[in-house]
Amino acid sequence: MIKPFIIILLIFMVFGAGYYLYNKPKVSKYDTKEIEAYKEPYQAPLINPEAIIINKKDLELKLFPQAKYIISARILHRKKYQDGWASKISPLDLVLGWGDISKPEMFNEFKFRQITRWYSFRYKSQNSQPLSMNYVASHSSNHHIIPATENIAKALIFVKKSDLIELDGYLVNVIGKYKGAKAAWHSSLSRLDTGSRSCEVMYVKKLKVGTKVYK
């Protein structure tokens, strides 16, 4: 007789494998160029960009690109969201760090936290302060990620804390309606601001993790 716990294990393995295969993203291409997390994010103005339309159940949105944006960084923290209209287009926030804060050893120096679409950080030890708080604030940022394709959305499921990644897309403002009520989200256009509206709302058209590129 097969014991109950073995049956449960087999069911878990079958459904777990099925979930993985269903959600496994397709690699669009391979790129061996180094992800240069020590560099500042690239931002450039756009000329007459077209609005991006998103229509889902109870949700009618227009995304207005504000700037071309490319960032190479290390994931300092990540958090998934399921509540509210914003989670329907942006179910994941990534705290990204570049420059000295992207160095692997900094994980032993700082503690990052995310809650209600905000992030915060502190020293793990007051006796060790290798970077100033101002430096960390100006070289890290919370990104509300809006994947442009289902394939990118699937790839984002598997990115994890400490990964080096590159995101290519637009910083956007979002305006529309959810269940008839006004819905709006505005992106920061500066890496130096803090507090309300200091997060980047990013429409991601390309994701690179290691040497794998997803579109």
Image (tube, grey):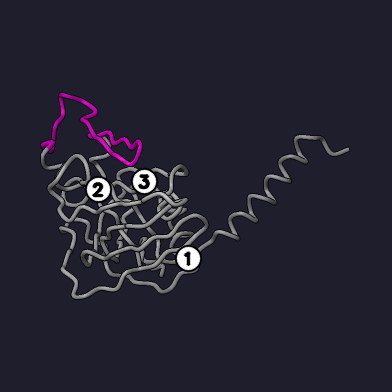
**What amino acid type should be assigned to the residue bearing mark 2?**
Cys
Q: Residue at x 48, y 64 (%)?
A: 150
Q: Seen from this angle, which residue lies furthest front?
A: 180
Dot 1 or dot 2: first in sequence order is 1
Q: Are marks 3 and 2 in contact (CB under 8 Å)?
A: no
Which numbered dot is residue 82? none
- The mark found on residue 199 in the picture is 2
- Is 74 magenta? The answer is no
Give the mark toward the camera: 3 or 1: 1
Amino acid residing under circle 1: Asn
Q: Which residues are magenta?
A: 109-133
Q: x and y percent of residue 103 in the render?
A: 22, 47
For residue 194, which quarter of the picture?
top left
Q: Within the magenta stretch, is there residue 121?
A: yes
**Which of the labelled discs sits on residue 151, or is there none?**
1
Q: From the image, state whether disc 1 or disc 2 is nearer to you.
A: 2
Mark 2 element type: loop
Please tell me how crowded label 3 is: few (under 14), some (14-19), or many (20+) other residues with Cα within 10 Å: some
Image check: 85 left or right of 33? right
Residue at horizontal 22 percent and vertical 56 percent from the top: 37
Q: Residue at x 30, y 61 (%)?
A: 166
